[in-house]
Amino acid sequence: MSSRSSRRPAAAASGAPADAGLVAARLERLHVGARTELDHRDAFELLVATVLSAQTTDVRVNQVTPGLFSRWPGPAALAEADEDAVTEQVRPLGMGATRARRIIGLSRALLVDHDGEVPDDQAALERLPGVGRKTAHVVRGAWFGRSLLAVDTHVGRLSRRLGWTTATDPRAVEEDVVARVEADGTGADAEDLTMLGLRLILHGRRVCTARAPRCGECVLADLCPSAGEAP
Ligand code: SF4
């Protein structure tokens, strides 16, 4: 046995998947007050901010959305907006023209198909331009209070490290994690997939980072089959 593996907690060293109920309960205590980090005042702003967050950070999105929503408040205003002006507004995020077209098209579709209201309906949301399964889950989970796992890069990475899945496809990760939570879900709010996802994201940003996970400080180390082994 190597010196590194000899220092690993016994449960983690067994290689068994981490108990999802215990993970959820510990993350709930650690990441108190977890919520989406995208600033918003209503469902429309959350939807647009989530669409804009593709391939950039929440912090950067929060820097452009106050100006965006101040100039074009609501779907009716954004649907009529000049595309070049919106492009200028979102340019700091990169791919400004693409993002502008996307959120203008999204606003128009909301007006035409839903009278400007964001629907609490998975299929209807996924039919909107630029909206996929993850974005729909973020909005329905954070705004409408649904229990839905939004699989981003952090949730995928942690789920693999915790032994809940070997998948990389987000839909397959989601199915594996939901099955694991249903099998193990005995913790404080393990069944609340929205909150579990938000806490996994925070843990991924602060502790279990992609390149340098801080296993020595991690509250999940005795449960995690990757403790001390993750790159
Ligand atoms: S930081 Fe280490 S122990 Fe904690 S979840 Fe990540 S890989 Fe597992």
Image (tube, helix red, strand yellow):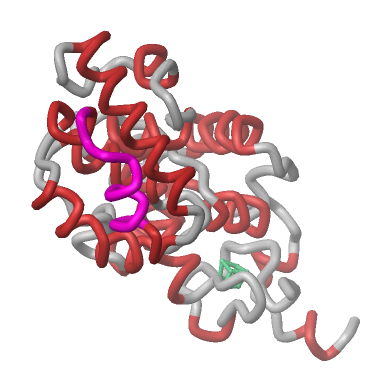
Residue at (57, 70) in percent of width and height: 222
The residue nearer to you, when weighing 5 against 178, is: 178
Q: Is residue 26 magenta?
A: no
Q: How many numbered dots are placed on residues in this image?
A: 0
Relative to residue 131, is residue 36 drawn left or right?
left
Q: Residue 217, relative to residue 70: is it above or below?
A: below
Rendered-image quarter of ligand 1: bottom right
Tell me which segment is drawn in magenta: 80-90
Residue 81 vertical position relative to residue 33 in the rendered view, above or below: above
From where the camera sits, is residue 22 visible?
A: no
* Foreground of the two, 124 or 105: 105
Residue closest to the far bottom: 3
Q: Residue at x 41, y 35 (%)?
A: 102
The image position of residue 219, as x and y in percent, is 45, 73
Residue 154 in picture, x, y percent from top left: 53, 57
Horizontal and vertical percent for residue 33? 19, 61
Question: Is 82 in the magenta?
Answer: yes
Residue 126 % position (x, y): 43, 20
Side (left or right) of 208 relative to 69: right
Name the one closer to the observer, 167 or 137: 137
At x 72%, y 71%, the residue is: 230
Name the dominant secondary structure of the magenta segment.
helix
Quarter of the image that includes the C terminus: bottom right
Residue 225 seen in render = yes
Q: Quadrant of residue 100?
A: top left
Please identify the residue farthest to the top as the structure is shown. Answer: 113
Compared to residue 95, the image places residue 175 above or below, namely above
**In the rendered image, which quarter is residue 34 located in?**
bottom left
Please indicate whether residue 42 sits to the left or right of residue 151 in the image.
Answer: left
- Tell me the quadrant of the picture where the N terminus can be found: bottom right
